[in-house]
Image (tube, grey):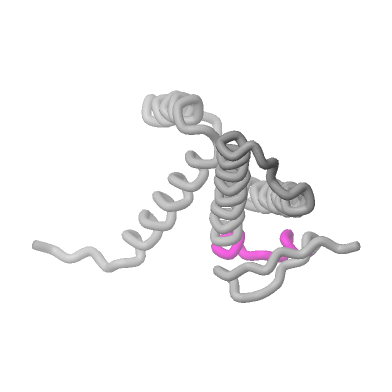
């Protein structure tokens, strides 16, 4: 059985083995979509558990099983996509104050926000920076 994810952002179905063929831009889009999907599933399971506690009626076991299975698949996809993104990122040793500062800032943000949110923010910042660099500089 091959696992697939129907990506709305890429407008196609992605098989797990195809992830390593994605461009960095597509990988970022897919990763963000997967993170959002996992968060949405977590929210729905949480809501179902709150409703179950309030009503005394447990959530449908089949539904819970399906959601948890989909979540595991999305997490597996996200892990693979993250490997693709990390393998394409340049690796450098921090040698200047700015690099060391950035490394420490990343550590603190990771501790405060968690890996998922931090990755999304970094991807958005990188995309914005690339967009800024592609715009011709205008002299005032």
Q: Provide residue 93's location: percent of width, then percent of height.
A: 55, 31
Instruction: Look at 58% across and 48% down and name the residue there.
Output: 44
Which SS type dominates the magenta stretch?
A: helix
Query: Vertically, is 98 above or below 91?
Result: above
Instruction: Look at 27% across and 68% down and name the residue there.
Output: 136
Residue 122 at least partly seen:
yes
Q: Name the foreground residue: 133 vs 11.
A: 11
Instruction: Look at 59% across and 39% down and name the residue there.
Output: 55
Instruction: Look at 67% across and 65% down and name the residue there.
Output: 22
Residue 95 at least partly seen:
no
Q: Provide residue 68's location: percent of width, then percent of height.
A: 73, 47
Q: Quadrant of residue 26?
A: bottom right
Q: Name the foreground residue: 71 vs 120.
A: 71
Residue 38 vs residue 135: left or right?
right
Q: Which residues are magenta?
A: 18-27
Q: Is residue 22 magenta?
A: yes
Q: Quadrant of residue 33?
A: bottom right
Residue found at the very far left of the displayed protein: 140
Locate the C terminus by quadrant. bottom left
Residue 63 vs residue 37: left or right?
right
Q: Provide residue 1's location: percent of width, then percent of height.
A: 91, 62
């Amino acid at each position: 059985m091959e696992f697939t994810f129907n990506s709305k952002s890429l407008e196609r179905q992605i098989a797990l083995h195809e992830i390593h063929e994605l461009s960095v831009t597509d990988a970022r889009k897919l990763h963000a979509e997967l993170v959002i999907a996992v968060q949405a599933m977590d929210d729905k399971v949480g809501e179902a558990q709150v409703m179950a506690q309030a009503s005394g009626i447990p959530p449908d076991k089949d539904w819970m099983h399906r959601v948890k299975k989909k979540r595991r698949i999305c997490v597996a996809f996200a892990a693979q996509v993250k490997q693709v993104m990390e393998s394409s990122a340049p690796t450098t040793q921090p040698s200047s104050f700015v690099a060391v500062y950035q490394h420490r800032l990343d550590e603190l943000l990771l501790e405060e926000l968690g890996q998922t949110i931090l990755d999304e923010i970094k991807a958005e910042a990188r995309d914005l920076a690339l967009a800024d660099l592609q715009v011709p500089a205008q002299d005032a």
